[in-house]
Image (cartoon, helix red, strand yellow):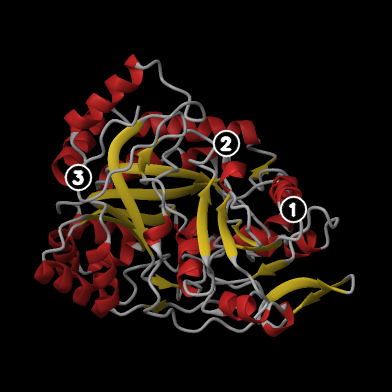
Amino acid sequence: MPGFNSIAFVYPDDGRGARFDRMFPPLGLEYVAAGVRDCFEHRSLIDFRFDENWEEQIPENCDIAALSLLWDAPIHRMLNVSRRLKEMRPGIRIVAGGRVAEVNKKALVTATPEERVDVVFSGPDDGRFRIYVESGQAIKVPGVSYLDDGEYRETAAVFQGPIPDRPLPDRTMRKHTYGMIRRDGFDAGVASDAIQSSRGCPYHCSFCTFNRDSEGRHLAFTGRSAESVADELEQIEAPYVMFTDDNVCHDIKRMERLCDLLIERKIDKVYGLETRVNIGLRPTLVEKMARAGFRHITFGLESMHDHVLKFLNKDLKRRTIERAFSRIHHMDMLFIGNFIIGNVGETREQMLQIPKFAHAIGLDSVQINHLRCRGPEPLTETVKATPGYYIDPKTRKVYSDENSLDDMADISRQIKREFWTKKQILRSAWKTKKLMTPISFSSVAWHWLLWEVMGRPDPWGNRKNRQTRGNSRLLPSY
C-alpha cells in the first residue's frame, strides 16, 4: 500500500451565469468515493459552489486530492487549483478526471512541477481509481496519463463495458443540501438530487461530445437494472430528481419495468430526464411514466428542418417529431424542446420559425443552444471545410459570413421573446404548478420575499447553509 491516509474530493466551480447550477451534486466524485470507501481513514468533499473558503477545509493530513474537471474552463484556472493545493500540502498527490480533464490531459500533466496534475483519468471510474490508490502507480491503471522520468506517458484505455449496478454514489459526505439555488443567491426552497441509470447512446449525432470515449470510439448504450435504479431512488431523500443519462428511455422494457417498480413501491418523487422524441411514438409507456412521477421531459429536437436534421445526423425527420407530439401533447407532463441554431445551411428566417413550430407541437418551454464545435466530434471538420463558416476559438461557437456571433445572440433572444407570449407564460405556469408537486409556489414566493428583504445577500458572503433532511421543503437559508 502506498500509505494514503486522507483524501479530498474537490469539485471546482465553472464560475458562469446565474442559473440554478447548484441543483446537481458532484455525482461523478461520489461514485469514485464509493469505490474507495474503505481505503482511507478520512475522506472529505469540497464543492466550490458552496465552499467559498475551500482552502480552510482541506484536512491537515490530506495526502491526495481528486478533482472533477467537468465544465469548460480555461486551463490556467484548473492549474491554479492544483498549485494552491500543492502550496498548502507539500507532497500531495493530485489526480483529475472529467470531460475537460480528458481533453486537456497532456497540458495538465506536463505543466510546471508546482502546478501540474500528477495523473489524469479518462472515462468513468469503474474501479480504476481503487487500483491506483492501492498500488500508488499510474502505470498499473488503464486509461490514465502521467509523467515518467519527465516523459509524457499514457496507458492503454480499456473500452468501456456495461455500466455496473453497484456501487451507488456515496452521498454521506455531503455538507450541503443541493436544490434550486441560483448563482446570485436566490434559493427557491426545493431540494434536488441526480441519478445516472445508463450511459452511452446508440445514435451518432454529429454535434455530440458525449457518445465517444477519449479515443474516439463510440459508446454503445448500456443500462443499469431497473431494480438497482429503483433501489437508489428509494434511498434518495430529495423530492425532485434529475436523470443525467444521455438517452434514458432507449431500452423500452427497462423503462417499463422501472415505472412498474416505482408505482409498486410507492416511491413518490418527481423526475426530470432528457431523451429522444421517438418515445412519443409509444404513448402507453409515456402515460405510465407520468403516473410513476416522470413529469419533466426534455427532448433533443435540435431543428424542425429536415436538411438541418440531416446535417446534424439526427436520424430524425420533421414528420416524426410532429407525429410523436400529436400522441402525447395532452399528457400530464412538462415538455421542453432543445433546439440548436447556427447550423450550416440554416438561414436566419429558418431559425426564427422555432417559436411557431414549438407552439404548434405543444411545447411548454424551449432551450436555444448555439452550435458549438468543441473538438473531437466529426462536426468540427465539416464546419471547417465549409466556406463562409467559422469556429470562434474562445467559445467554440459557430458563426458565418451571414450571421456573426452578435447576430446569433440577437436571433436567440428574438426566438425566446416570440415563444414566451402571455398565453404561453400562463399555460406553462399553470402546468408547472399542477405537475411539479415539490414546488410550492407560495413557498417559492416566501423565499423570494425573504431574499429581497435581506437585501439579496451575496452568495459568497455571510450566507449560512442550513442543513435539512428528509422529504421536506427547505427552510429559509438566510
In this orientation, does residue 200 appear? Answer: no
Regarding mark 3 in the picture, which secondary structure is present there? loop
Point out residue 323 in the picture as x, y percentages from the top left corner: 25, 61
Q: Is residue 374 above or below residue 365?
A: below
Which comes sooner in the sequence, label 2 or label 3?
2
Which comes sooner in the sequence, label 2 or label 1?
1
Q: What's under tag 3, amino acid-wise? A: Ser
Mark 2, mark 1: which one is toward the viewer?
Answer: 1
Q: What's under tag 1, amino acid-wise? A: Lys
Point out residue 178 in the picture as x, y percentages from the top left corner: 37, 46
Q: Residues within 10 Å of mark 2 (few under 14, many from 20)?
A: many
For the residues labelled 2 and 3, the Cα–Cα distance comes to 42 Å
State left or right for residue 81 relative to residue 442.
right
Point out residue 18 in the picture as x, y percentages from the top left corner: 47, 33
Say which residue label 1 marks: 86
For the residues bearing labels 2 and 3, Cβ distance under 8 angstroms: no
Q: Name which residue lies at 34% across and 73% down.
A: 250
For the residues labelled 2 and 1, the Cα–Cα distance comes to 42 Å
Say which residue label 2 marks: 408
Residue 154 placement: quadrant: bottom right
For the residues labelled 1 and 3, the Cα–Cα distance comes to 41 Å
Q: Name which residue lies at 82% across and 53% down.
A: 114
User: The C terminus lies in which quarter of the figure?
Assistant: top left
Mark 2, mark 3: which one is toward the viewer?
Answer: 3
State left or right for residue 335 relative to residue 305.
left
Q: Name which residue lies at 39% across and 66% down.
A: 196
Q: Is residue 39 above or below residue 108?
A: below
Point out residue 120 in the picture as x, y percentages from the top left corner: 69, 67
For the residues bearing labels 1 and 3, Cβ distance under 8 angstroms: no
In this orientation, does residue 149 appear? Answer: yes
Say which residue label 3 marks: 472
Q: Nearer the viewer, residue 377 or 53?
A: 53
